Amino acid sequence: APLAELRGASKRYGATMALEGLDFRVGRGEIVALLGPNGAGKTTALGLLNGRLSADSGRVSLLGGDPRDWRVRQRLGVMLQEARLPDQLRVGEYLQLFASHYPEPRPIDEVLALTGLEALVSRRHDALSGGEQRRLQFALAIIGRPALLLVDEPTVGLDIEARQRFWQLIRRLRGEGLAMVLTTHYLDEADALADRIVVIGSGRVLAEGTPAGIKARA
Ligand code: ADP
Ligand code: ADP
């Protein structure tokens, strides 16, 4: 069975059809990139997978269950675009707080090393650079040992170096076999990271294939 699957998922906001019969699946150890321009429906698709939104029609399955079930959601790691973290905590305090919500969290030192945040453990969130905040978000998303990670537009607004470091970080986690759904509007990012690319436009799948296959058509 796939780790996650959308089948004919539709979602409307008032008069706007955000998703119109979207289909895709994520297999074990696979990184799937949802690639498309702003407004394509990528964030809405992630919202269905993380249980924040309900589909109007179609089916959404996550880790063999329903994403609106918190026991299913607890096995999911989520890194969204806007960091909604209270600013008064320090990096190490966030990691402790998040770790305390999971039965078998990764050791905090391991997460710090993985994300290159060791030297920043006592730094407050509001004193981190953009790239560092992204890495903290990522650290918080993986600390519970998720079975699947959802990552929304991870490198928007980062400079080239910070972007490349983020890619390295994602590749390292992929090396551990962690499956991911990654949204992006950059073809080079999807190409660098994904096993499979699902091109979305106007809430539909326009094309699907390996990075090489998608680039050949572009
Ligand atoms: P993407 O992540 O690819 O930019 P979204 O899923 O955010 O796309 O948006 C898909 C469409 O739904 C867009 O036309 C967007 O304007 C619309 N939309 C998204 N969220 C809302 C909302 N809360 N209310 C009304 N329209 C929305
Ligand atoms: P920004 O560009 O937003 O300031 P970066 O993401 O480029 O932030 O990182 C800032 C510092 O953290 C750099 O000195 C870099 O060497 C270090 N760094 C970034 N990612 C890692 C990582 N995965 N492992 C170890 N060190 C890292």
Image (cartoon, rainbow, N blue to C red):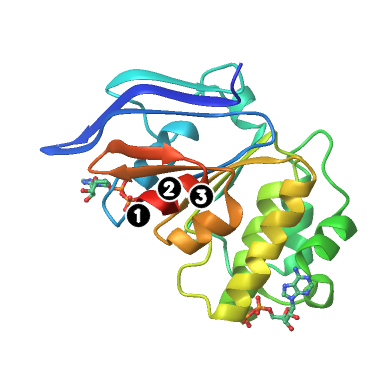
Q: Which residue is mark 2?
A: 214
Name the spot of residue 184 as percent of width and height, x first: 44, 56
Q: Type of residue at label 1?
A: Ala
Q: Which residue is mark 3?
A: 212
Q: Which residue is mark 1?
A: 218
Q: CA distance from mark 3 to mark 1?
A: 10 Å
Q: CA distance from mark 2 to mark 1?
A: 6 Å
* Kind of element beneath mark 3: helix
Q: Type of residue at label 2?
A: Ile
| Whether residue 189 is visible | yes
Left-right relation of 52 to 149? left
Reply above or below: 197 against 55. below
Reply above or below: 110 against 34. below
Asked whether disc 2 touches disc 3, contact meaning CB atoms under 8 Å apart, the reply is yes
Name the spot of residue 16 as percent of width and height, x first: 15, 40
Residue most toward the left?
Answer: 15
Please name whichever residue, 122 or 209, is drawn nearer the observer in this view of the structure.
Answer: 209
